[in-house]
Image (tube, rainbow, N blue to C red):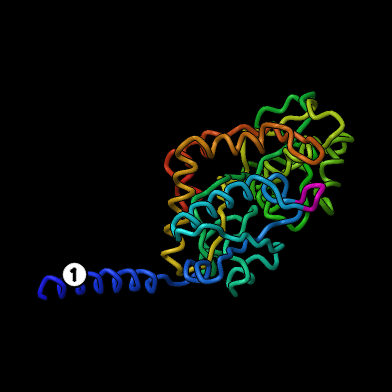
């Protein structure tokens, strides 16, 4: 009698613990478990991070990382299958759609900064961009100081033209700064020798070089007008259990060497649909970040 009572008690305790564990799920993990679905926000033209291929399917570097996170969430929740829903986002809609629960992960090219961390959270950094300049090899430029007295273009209304203007004053360069209406016009000015250099985010410069008539004619500077700016996969703020799963998944991916392979696939090889190669090898700062993953918004922590 006593033994049966004890067995019954143990079973009830075990069942109770199981139920408690199931009830402990909160926020995003709870919602994913209950619906059997996770929603990824994607960009339609952020090459090579997140964009549509010829079949209108979202692909890219950030999409590959998000798919690894999905695998980790599926494993964490012990789900046999997990439906992946895809929701387009833009620069303007990505934060509102994250905040209101429409998307669970934003897989794009979003800069992780202090201002944005007031509204959303980020997982470990997957890319570092900086404001650099592109020029023709034939111009023989070596450093920012070599731009002295020359004509340099940047796109109006960007932080890049602001950084160029500040450096021009601080270094007493006497640069003739031309504001272009968009990135394409700015690159065309270097292509047609109306400007010696174009200042912009290095990854955007790399995509213009890759798409040009003669990619081998151009060089992107090692010198930068800005500190490294981290890109991260975005998730909802104040959801510690979900962030813990996502952070563990990205940290394992980056530190294992697999993150470097995914990076090489999108930045040093031809990518669909046009077969462009950005020729942007993994830099020392990002290599260091992959070895010790971090979600810091502070550019100084990536030097």
* Camera-side residue of 63 and 4: 4
Q: Position of residue 247 (x, y in %)?
A: 45, 53
Quarter residue 20 falls in: bottom left
Q: Is residue 103 magenta?
A: no
Q: Position of residue 224 (x, y in %)?
A: 62, 40
Decide if residue 270 is in sight here. Answer: yes
Q: Is residue 98 left or right of residue 244?
A: right
Mark 1 Cα shell of 10 Å, populated few (<14), some (14-19), many (≥20) = few
- Residue to which mark 1 is pinned: 7
Magenta-drawn segment: 52-56
Main SS of residues in magenta: loop
Quarter residue 268 falls in: top right
* Camera-side residue of 21 and 52: 21
Q: Is residue 30 left or right of residue 225?
A: left
Q: Position of residue 229 (x, y in %)?
A: 57, 49
Element on which disc 1 rests = helix
Q: Is residue 67 left or right of residue 219?
A: left
């Amino acid at each position: 009698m006593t033994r049966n009572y004890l067995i019954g008690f143990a079973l009830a305790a075990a069942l109770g613990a199981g139920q408690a564990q199931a009830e402990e799920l909160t926020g995003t993990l709870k919602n994913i478990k209950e619906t059997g679905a996770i929603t990824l926000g994607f960009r339609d033209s952020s090459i090579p991070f997140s964009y549509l291929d010829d079949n209108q399917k979202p692909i890219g570097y950030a999409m590959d990382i998000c798919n690894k996170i999905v695998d980790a969430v599926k494993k964490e929740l012990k789900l046999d299958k997990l439906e992946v829903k895809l929701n387009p986002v833009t620069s303007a809609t990505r934060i509102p759609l994250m905040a209101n629960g429409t998307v669970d992960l934003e897989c794009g090219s979003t800069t992780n900064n202090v201002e944005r961390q007031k509204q959303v959270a980020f997982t470990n950094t997957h890319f570092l961009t900086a404001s650099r300049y592109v020029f023709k090899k034939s111009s023989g430029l070596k450093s920012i100081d070599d731009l002295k007295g020359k004509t340099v273009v940047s796109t109006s209304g960007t932080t890049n033209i602001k950084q160029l203007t500040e450096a021009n004053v601080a270094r007493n360069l006497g640069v003739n700064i031309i504001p272009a209406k968009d990135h394409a016009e700015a690159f065309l000015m270097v292509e047609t020798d109306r400007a010696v250099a174009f200042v912009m985010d290095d990854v955007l410069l790399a995509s213009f070089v890759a798409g040009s008539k003669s990619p081998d004619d151009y060089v992107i500077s090692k010198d930068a007008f800005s500190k490294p700016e981290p890109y991260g996969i975005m998730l909802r703020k104040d959801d510690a259990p979900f962030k813990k799963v996502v952070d563990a998944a990205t940290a394992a991916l980056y530190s294992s060497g697999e993150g470097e392979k995914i990076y090489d696939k999108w930045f040093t090889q031809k990518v669909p649909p046009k077969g462009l190669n950005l020729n942007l090898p993994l830099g020392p700062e990002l290599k260091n970040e992959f070895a010790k993953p971090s979600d810091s918004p502070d550019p100084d922590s990536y030097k």
